[in-house]
Image (spheres, rainbow, N blue to C red):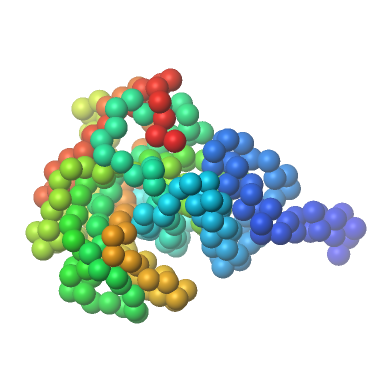
Amino acid sequence: MSQDNLTEDCTYKHDLATVADAFFNAHYTKVWRLEKSSPERLAISEAYQVQNQVCEKRIARGESVVGYKVGCTSRAIRSQLGLATPISARLFAPYVTGARIGIDWTAYGHCAIEPEMVLMIGHDLCGADLSDEELIQSISYVSPGIELHDYTFWHQPPSAQELICSGGIHAGLIVGDTKVSPRALTFGRENFFVYQNNELVASSRADEIMGGPLESLRWLVNFLSSNDEVLKKGMIVIPGCPTELISITCDSLVRVKIDKLGQVETTFRSQSPSPR
């Protein structure tokens, strides 16, 4: 190995705590301060260690974990990001809310949204490859939702490792008032529609989410169980989006409608109070 390559490798080898500090700070400041870093050089297990450390820092800051998301679950998202495998990340209070008015889209590095089914978990879940019936029995109700993203990758091209470290570029979740029994859904044939200023900008079916949201929930339970964790009663889960990410670049009204679930909407206005 040349001296230049040796120097580059030694410079890169930041400890995971330093990488976690960089992602934690970037989440709030929208600035990346760790030079000569390259998250794709991390092992996937190391990326989840970074995510865990960022989670601990956010809890110490006064936030709390209220659920999980599964990301990178549809062909549309995978094609958009250039990635191939699903990832898991946490959802935090106080960034899970009801309908919001005047979310400041300029407060994000790159504001974007996704339509989501929001699953409320009714009892603890663990184990490998649970049946559809076991999963359905675990869901208290389902609501429509809008996931908020800060669609920023500090390194190009995007990598699964950076997506994991960043917590799935998740920035918040808006949950509609409707609460529907899981027995009323097929978890496959429901259509998702996204409107921006009353214009349809994206649509797709629920089965684009890994074959259906139950497949995504099963993947999450498998993932947590493999790490000796339990998906606990009272947690919420967003299993992924069948459409591409939709960027918010101007003041607008966004409405998500999902078959059998109804709709949820919010407004984005520049220079208004942010959900952060």
In this view, the residue in front, 249 or 218, is 218
Question: In the visual, does 210 lie left or right of 176?
Answer: right
In this view, the residue in front, 36 or 138, is 138
Res 3 → quadrant? bottom right
Question: In the visual, does 114 lie left or right of 43?
Answer: left
Where's residue 227, x and y in %?
Answer: 47, 74
- Please, is residue 274 above or below residue 20 in the view? above
- Please, is residue 201 above or below residue 173 in the view? above
What's the residue at 73%, 44% (across, down)?
35
Q: Residue furthest left?
A: 184
Where's residue 265, x and y in %?
Answer: 23, 34
Quarter occupied by the N terminus: bottom right
Question: In the visual, does 27 lie left or right of 112?
Answer: right
Where's residue 206, x and y in %?
Answer: 23, 55
Q: Residue furthest right?
A: 3
Question: In the visual, does 217 lie left or right of 58?
Answer: left
Q: Residue furthest bottom?
A: 128
